[in-house]
Amino acid sequence: MKGSAFGKVILLGEHAVVYGVPAIVVGIDRGATARAAAPDKVGAQGASSELVLRAEGREQSLTVLPDATSDLARAFSALLEACAVTAAVRVEAATELPAAAGLGCSAALAVAIVRALDAWLERPAASLEETIERAMAWEKVFHGNPSGIDATAAARGGCLLYERNHGGARMHELQLSTPLTLAIGHTGIPSTTRAMVEHVARLRERRPDLVEKSFDGIRSLVNNARLALEANDVVGLGRLMDLNQMLLSGLMLSTEEIEAMCRIAREAGALGAKLTGSGGGGCVVALVENDAEPVLAGWDKAGFRSFSTRAFQRAQASERSRAP
Ligand code: PMV
């Protein structure tokens, strides 16, 4: 009765993607798993659904009551409704991803839970589109106006050019002739997607020309990155990531820690480095030619936690995913 899902890294195009600019996202082999079963306790008012969440070495347990006030309880309740689950259920979910770090932790949990619920109810597994749509019910509670890129990457994995358009999304799967090697480091500062997306919306109201120019720049970087990926030009891709970081800094999404981590990564031989996800904290992604170790060692010396991962195209990603 288990489900699983990928975490994600946005290689280029975060924030602009909310406004219809394409972005490039890759699924990573760290993600989330979930298991669903009938609850073992029945309280005085009948059985209530329960979510037990294991993340970052901590366990959190909550029961869904109609007057739920925490975002997590409301998100779980919205997800049960989107999955048309009427019976009480106990869901145990676990993730290896840091929360509020730009790696798609909440979307991976949502997708894993959707899959676990289908398995528990012995229903045919929902299509990718349906899985993503259900997961969005949970994502909207946390993020307000999510582009859907996280839920899409969590469900599909692989490397995608993703574009939000008029209430829907268009995506194009990118073929990677060789896997990408990525170093991912955590600033240690949590970042809230909702707050950072609102920051950009406010800046766009105050300085529309600055933001539109940046988004135009990001659009052409993403288009060039697509060509670089298709030509297996990792050096070119790294340069484009550096340029994307400059534009994100101009939108005031970077921090001292992010800048320091990008510098350390480049000095250690990374082909490019930038914030990934919403910025204002969270994670930095560095693209390396083969060996992520020098970048990880540089970050470690400066006190930043990190890990390396490889991004595959979809067929290989599914084979290699930590599916139950
Ligand atoms: O920080 P994350 O993993 O939630 O990534 C957010 C990506 C944004 O483009 C900033 C927001 C969105 O909904 O696409």
Image (cartoon, rainbow, N blue to C red):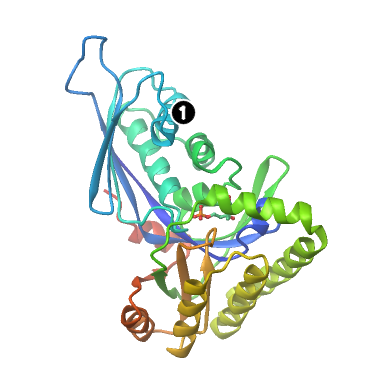
Q: Which residue corresponds to mark 1? A: 78
42 relative position to 18: left or right: left
> Is the residue marked by circle 1 packed among few (<14), some (14-19), or many (20+) residues within 10 Å?
many
In the rendered image, residue 155, in percent from the top left (x then y), is placed at 46, 48
Q: Quarter holding the N terminus?
A: top left
In the rendered image, residue 40, in percent from the top left (x then y), is placed at 17, 23
Q: In percent of the image, x 52 and y 49: which residue is there?
A: 152
202 relative position to 182: left or right: right
Residue 303's place in the image compared with 199, above or below, is below
Between 65 and 238, the one nearer to me in the picture: 65
Query: Please, which residue is most extreme toward the left here?
Result: 40
Q: Which of the four quarters of the rendered structure image does ligand 1 lie in?
A: bottom right
Residue 288's place in the image compared with 202, above or below, is below
Query: Please, which residue is most extreme toward the right here?
Result: 209
In the rendered image, residue 172, in percent from the top left (x then y), is placed at 62, 57
User: What element does badge 1 sit on?
Assistant: helix
Residue 86's place in the image compared with 75, above or below, is above
Residue 202's place in the image compared with 43, above or below, is below
In the rendered image, residue 260, in percent from the top left (x then y), is placed at 48, 79
Q: Can residue 236 be seen at all in this image of the molecule?
A: yes
Which amino acid does the dot numbered 1 rest on?
Ala
Between 113 and 280, the one nearer to me in the picture: 280
